[in-house]
Image (cartoon, helix red, strand yellow):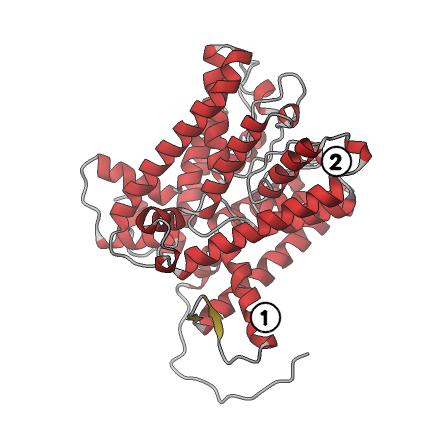
Amino acid sequence: MPFWNNERLSPSQIIILGYFLLILCGTGLLMLPSTTRDGLGADFGDALFTATSAITVTGLVVHDTMRYWSFFGQAVILLLIQMGGLGVISMAVAVAVLAGQKIGFRMRYVMQESISAPHLAGIVRLTGFIFRTVLAVELAGAALLALRFCPDMGLGKGLWMALFHAVSAFCNAGFDLMGEAQPYSSLTAWREDALVCLVIAALITLGGIGFLTMNDVRSHGRHLRRYSLQSKLVLLSSLVLTAGGFLFYFFFEFQKESWNMSLPQAALAALFQAVSPRTAGFNSVDLGALHPISQLFTILLMLVGAAPGSTGGGFKVTTLAVLVLGLMAIFLHRNDVRGFGRRLPDMALRKASGLFVCYLLLFLAGGMLLSALDDLPLMTAFFESASAIGTVGLSLGATPHLSDTSRMLIMALMYFGRVGGLTVLFAFSSNMRQDGFRYPAEDVAVG
């Protein structure tokens, strides 16, 4: 019996176990001799870190992907990225459907929890929509990137590079194969290429808004009033964060003479950097050359992350939106939290507050531990910590040089960031006894 049909496991525990088993399988594959260019295979530590980064669609690496891994190794990493982006439960449902198996109620329930779907009805149809969308978007992105890569690199290599980066971008993974000329360079050599940067940015955005939002767009088109409240919050929050990030990077960072950019080049770089920290992990400029304030701003964007039910991590844009709506309710002396003509349940605000505090504490603890363990500057340590827990993959160059203990810490943060804070909390609290009574209420002065 597959583990996802085990009645003793809660949906949250199944999701956590599924990702763990997938990481172990990926680790075993990456240790095969044919996965590395030297024919020796990766050692357990490097394979485990890379598999964890790929499955959690983070993009932090200990070896340059192009220089260290063979074509077979790169293909394994791409497969792990695709499975991690779609989600382990979505993959299980797809395999079951292709095998002609009936999808029972329990599997539908686990699938609902996995992609944060609001309703159980139509969950299998939604899974089909997810796979069709992924295939169409990634192939379209690969075709557009091939227009640039094939003339420069040749047909075979150009098509592989286009496919790899299209999948990595849509899954918000951040793995790249651009290190042939300079290791760990990401897209810095293409920062002035509008086609490459805009296609990658578009793929990142589509993967980050989530499949539920894309399904709303498909179903209702321009009729925004018919969208669910979640989709409205995702689209508005994403637009505000992207626009705000663009304005910040454009006016504060890339107008400086040290960057030597024209206005179109600065606009392209600002747009890309506003999109990429939303869990993607690509960078078109040297992050170490950013002003410390810009690095701090990037950390904040990395912590927010993408939307629920998307290929990205972080504490999610809807969490931030609910917290902002909660603050507005307090400032406007409202008795409830409102948004787009709807009232949010009190539990939504409690979950958002709990998740925010949880991610913030883990981010701070992770950064301080990294700084203490490897004697890193605090900004560098916090940057790596935010990148890991937000499953982003951006780095100031410290990841390849971390100690084994720090690598384990980064892997734990990546894992937590991908499976989700609520999933982890529910997995450990699912068997706890629920009280059948309520204590008397008493107010407490706050502020």
Q: Amino acid at mark 2?
A: Gly
Disc 1: which residue: 327
Q: Horizontal and vertical percent for residue 46?
A: 58, 30
Res 371 seen here: no
Is residue 108 positioned above or below 358 on the image?
A: above
Mark linked to residue 304: none
Q: Position of residue 151 (x, y in %)?
A: 52, 12
**442 or 374, which is in the foreground?**
442
Dot 1, how many residues are within 10 Å of its Cα: few (below 14), some (14-19), or many (20+)?
few
Lateral position of residue 271 relative to residue 31, left or right: right
Residue beneath the point at 67% across and 35% down = 399
Mark closer to the chain start, 1 or 2 = 2
Whether residue 125 is visible, yes or no, is: yes
Image quarter of the N terminus? top left
Q: Residue furthest right?
A: 257
Residue placed under numbered mark 2 in the picture: 288
Report the side of 2 relative to 340 (left or right).
Answer: left
Q: Secondary structure at mark 1?
A: helix
User: In which quadrant of the rendered view does residue 192 lie?
Assistant: top right
Name of the residue lying farthest toward the top:
154
Position of the C terminus, as image quadrant, is bottom right
User: Quarter of the image holding residue 264?
Assistant: top right
